[in-house]
Amino acid sequence: MVTVLKFGGTSVGSAATIRQVSRIVGAAEGKRLVVVSAFAGVTNGLVEIIESLERGDEQGAVAALGHVSERCASIIHDLSLQGAVVEKYEEEIARLRALIPAILTLGEVTPRAADAILATGEIVSSFVVAAFLGALHLDARMIMITDDSFGAAHPDEAAIAQTVSERLVPLFSQVSIIVTGGYIGATKTGVTTTLGRGGSDYSAALFAAALGADRCEIWTDVNGLMSSDPRLVPTARTVPMLHYDEAAELAFFGAKVLHPLTIQPAVRCGIPVVIRNTFFPDGAATRIVGTVSGGGMKAVACRHGVAIVHIRSNRMLGTYGFLAELFEVFRRHRVAVDMVTTSEVSVSVTVDDSLALDALVADLSLLGSVDIERGCSQIALVGAGMRRQSGIGARFFSVLRDINILMVSMGASDTNLSVVLAEKDAPEALRRVHTAFFEKGEE
């Protein structure tokens, strides 16, 4: 039996939590690959170094490095680790310190240099946790092979399968527990890269797929995926089981305990993904699998920061090829489209509200009149088999009858009914839908 266990930053945020990780790993059976994030707060400190360097602020960069160094040194001390661990940690800090004047001389923080800085968090946390567990440490850059898209590198799954087979699997004939870092990788020529936000989850799932693991466990600070955002809906509860598709929808709509890309390798290999709470290991958890018996709605999610782009053109009427021309503009400007609705003479799409859209709008204006609504949120009811269940739409829209809905998507997905509304209306809408579907016996 092979299990991949990924622990996030809060799970390795102190000596006490690392001791808890040790107990969890020790209680697991079979071969275990432990994937860890940087110590809580360290990545923020590394980002601060980069931001200081971008401003040309050497003093600020050195001060931020000092905070990172103190944070790591404190955990190492509290775990009573000495010798080789301290020497390796000091080598990493010295490497970072040497980068500061080199980058300032260059006058630019290149994406490659930024990755060299950001990777330090997982490099240090992984060998510290390995030392405390008495486990074998394997540098993730030896097995996570990526392209050179620094900051958001794309893993080469074929290369990863090969490195895992050649470098990782043989080690399990000697030991039961191996510790590595998430989020980081390297190009085929050995240049350090990072996978971008939530990359540790993705690392864990990729390693699980390459190993043919029996399951992939994501250990975090909440009891699995919830039926809604508990900050806005206090009655939200853990969803015990989800289909891969349902989990993917919730991840996209802001379920931050799960990175949207995480389950893709698991889906392809049929590996269950389990979300558990490091601080309450015997508490509620969510199991994500390929087959779920029974139907029903599972959660209602909310995503803020949405903008609607409306395009109106009489050229659409009775013609073909207009939509292809329209979406070519979005492709050219590298603007991802989420929801789409159309009529005979208009198209509305949702995009990320944080994007600078002036150039996009200028090109879209060549096709028709363009209007943008910003400050919107998207509410999504998630549950498999939605098309085959009567009354879902009626109940959903009934509870929102006095809230202005700007856009609707229903039927495009068998697991998602979505609406877009003003951000100010989102909390109330979220609570109403949750009450209607999850607090009145509608499971």
Image (tube, grey):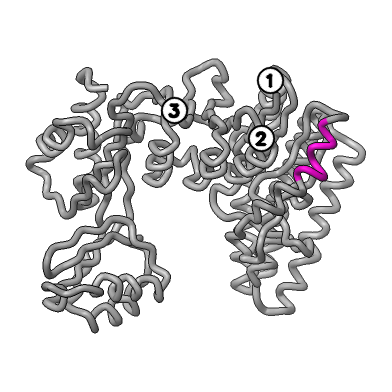
Q: Position of residue 318 (x, y in %)?
A: 12, 72
Q: Measure the C-alpha gap from mark 2 to mark 1.
A: 17 Å
Residue 212 has which mark?
Answer: 2
> Which residue is nearer to you in this view: 328 or 6?
328
Q: Are marks 2 and 3 in contact (CB under 8 Å)?
A: no
Of callouts 3 and 1, the N-terminal one: 1
Residue 291 has which mark?
Answer: 3
Residue 406 appears left or right of 248: left
Give the amino acid type for the residue marked by disc 3 in the picture: Thr
Residue 432 appears left or right of 239: left
Q: Is residue 24 above or below residue 316?
A: above
> Which residue is nearer to you in this view: 359 or 320?
320
Q: Is residue 196 above or below residue 19?
A: below
Q: What secondary structure is found at the residue carrying circle 1? A: loop
The quadrant where residue 413 appears:
top left
> Which residue is nearer to you in this view: 291 or 57?
291
Can residue 223 be seen by looking at this rendering? no
Q: Measure the C-alpha gap from mark 3 to mark 1.
A: 24 Å
Give the amino acid type for the residue marked by disc 1 in the picture: Ala
What stretch of residues is rendered in magenta? 164-172
Q: Which residue in the rendered view is the most extreme toward the left?
A: 402
The residue sitting at 60% across, 32% down in the picture is 216
Residue 28 has which mark?
Answer: 1
Q: Main secondary structure of the magenta part?
A: helix
Residue 117 has which mark?
Answer: none
Give the amino acid type for the residue marked by disc 2 in the picture: Gly
Point out the frontmost of discs 3 and 1. Answer: 3
The residue sitting at 54% across, 30% down in the picture is 272
Q: What secondary structure is found at the residue carrying circle 2? A: loop
The residue sitting at 71% across, 75% down in the picture is 104
Point out the frontmost of discs 2 and 1. Answer: 2
